[in-house]
Amino acid sequence: MKAQAVFAGAPQDLPAVLVGADFSRAGSIAHSRYFLVSVFVLLLVKMQYNDKEVVKMRRGVMLRGAWRIARTYWFSEEKWSAWLLLSSVIVLNLVLVYITVQLNLWQGSFYDAIQNFNYAGFLKIMEQYALLGVLFIVVKGYQIYVRMLLHLRWRRWLTERYLSAWLKKKSYYRLQLMARNATDNPDQRISEDVELFVMLTLRLSVDFLQDVVTVFSFVIILWNLSGVFYLPVGGQQIPIYGYLVWLALAYAIVGTYWTLKVGRPLVRLEYDQQRYEADFRFSLVRVREHAESIALYGGENNEKKNCMNRFNQIVVNFMKIIDVRKKLMWLTTGYSKISVIFAALIASPLYFRGQIHFGQMFQIIDAYNHVQVGFSFIIDSFTQLAQWRAVINRLNNFLTFLEAVQTEERSHPEVVSRQHHTDFGLEGVNVFQPNGQKLVQDLTLKLPVGQSLLITGPSGCGKSTLLRTLAGIWPYASGRIRLPRKARLMFIPQKAYMPINTLREVLLYPGPARSLNDADLQAVLTACRLSHLTGRLDEWMDWGQALSLGEQQRMAFVRALLQKPDWLFLDEATSALDEITEQTVYRLAVKALTKTTIISVGHRRTLVSYHQNRLLLGGDGSWELRTASLRS
Ligand SMILES: Nc1ncnc2c1ncn2[C@@H]1O[C@H](COP(=O)(O)OP(=O)(O)OP(=O)(O)O)[C@@H](O)[C@H]1O
């Protein structure tokens, strides 16, 4: 009973299993262990290299990219908790593998007790099972908990990092201008891609490690149970060590080869599916965003056609996925069903020769099953590698572009600078379109505090773009703009942003400059002809949808009157108002904001009377500064 002897000396705990405590049977078996490791590693590497779909990005580049995204967290202020959680997950994973191995050993004793009618032994091993079962459940619960905690904390940290980088220095706006094609859907990157990166990184490192350790542990159990198989060849008995392992590996390699061959198209198809789903979602969001215009144009049919075109891409691609999955299902189901028979078949010579017990026979089938399952997890990792690579690519591109726009700003420090002057001055300012076409050439002017300015000119001549340049968000400009250092600036566009919030918060956006009571807010609302809103301060809604454009423009004036900036820039901020209301709000602004210098952009002649200076832009770069007649 050679195999029994082997089993009697078989390792009782995981480390022993892993170091192969019972390999002393054959002098050269220590080498076989290394050989086994090498075969396994070679197999993995080869599978990885063979899959051209998976490995398009060079491995070094991919790993460096992953490290660039990951390292910030692992060396951040949260590093201690992160490493502690990671070590806990790894330890708990190893404990789970250890319990699974013990359960395999338990199976042997269980079937032996049944076969030998050993009731006392049977009851004893039932106790062992209860103990192992409880231990497994408790450890599994904690393992899932700690792993998910690590996942969540890492994701939260990364999301905050990407969100801060995106919102820093107006990058969200400039990114749109400068890298529109390269970084589409930043929302997808910050929500989906960050989540995918964390999930896949943990899957491909921590879980992968667990799968590999599981496969190794059970390969070693199989080796221990194999004993020596003597193959009769030409009247001679050739000894084969660990023959169960070789057969299990051969079976796994054949299965792996076919799974990869049949499943390979899934890599590209799943990747495309994700993209098509995002496109479809985006087209629906656009309908929601532009609901009013589409309704007024009656563009429902066009929108339906557009949305359905995108959805059809999903359908066509999904049909291909179904087809591949069907074939894969046949293959994997057949493969796993046959594996039980196969395991029993290859173990049977040992059993019928009396080399192993009944219980050991089941142990072999169980170990064999674990090797197959472990292998299939490892195979899964290869398809996930492609997804991981795509996510790393997208997140790194996003980071690179964010860094580029932020550095770009630093490379033109002379465009907008805050100085100790009280005046506002422009020296040799040039403003361009993104295609390089000049809108304003060599603009030089000085505006003392309190001297209002109106910028006018034909449509498309660059008035709003000049204002964007003054606000420091337009990157296509050169020259020198001096702004008073401590002055508070406020820019109001034609359609002011109305966050979805209570009316009070909307009025105080982007933050309360001073503490204001309801009476103050109501007084300013009434002065701006919005008395019908005074009782709705705590109402929460999408005010951008609920209010007319004219009402929104008056709301923007309320904001300015409440916040009392030193410099107020108005870009066609009264374009939707009738002349009487325009007069009311401008007069109010001039009267209430005595320390505020107003710079407006507009077409209306009526605006001239509220400004002391007028800048006329020609659209071809030319400009002219005039003094306007002021009306009180
Ligand atoms: N983000 C952008 N990308 C490409 N071109 C732009 C962009 N923003 C502005 N432009 C172009 O720059 C030019 C000036 O635009 P701008 O909005 O400053 O004109 P404007 O004088 O304010 O026009 P209007 O009086 O019609 O509001 C236009 O030809 C416009 O197409």
Image (cartoon, grey):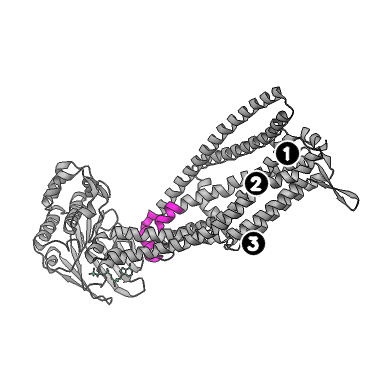
Question: Mark 2–mark 3 contact, CB under 8 Å?
Answer: no
Tag 3: Cα neighbours inside 10 Å, few (<14), some, or many (≥20)? Answer: few
Spatial CA distance of label 3 from label 1 is: 36 Å
Q: Closer to the camera: disc 2 or disc 1?
A: 1
Q: Is residue 209 left or right of residue 431?
A: right
Spatial CA distance of label 2 from label 1 is: 24 Å
Instruction: Indicate which disc residue 361 carries.
Output: 1
At mark 3, the secondary structure is helix
Quarter of the image where ligand 1 sits: bottom left
- Does residue 233 appear in this view? yes
Residue ID for mark 2 = 212
Residue ID for mark 3 = 50
Which quadrant: the C terminus? bottom left
What are the residue bounds of the magenta stretch? 166-192
Specify the amino acid type for callout 3.
Asn
Q: Closer to the camera: disc 3 or disc 1?
A: 1
Mark earlier in primary sequence (2, 3): 3
Under 8 Å from ligand 1: the CB of mark 3?
Answer: no
At mark 2, the secondary structure is helix
- Does residue 217 appear in this view? no
Under 8 Å from ligand 1: the CB of mark 2?
Answer: no
Specify the amino acid type for callout 2.
Val
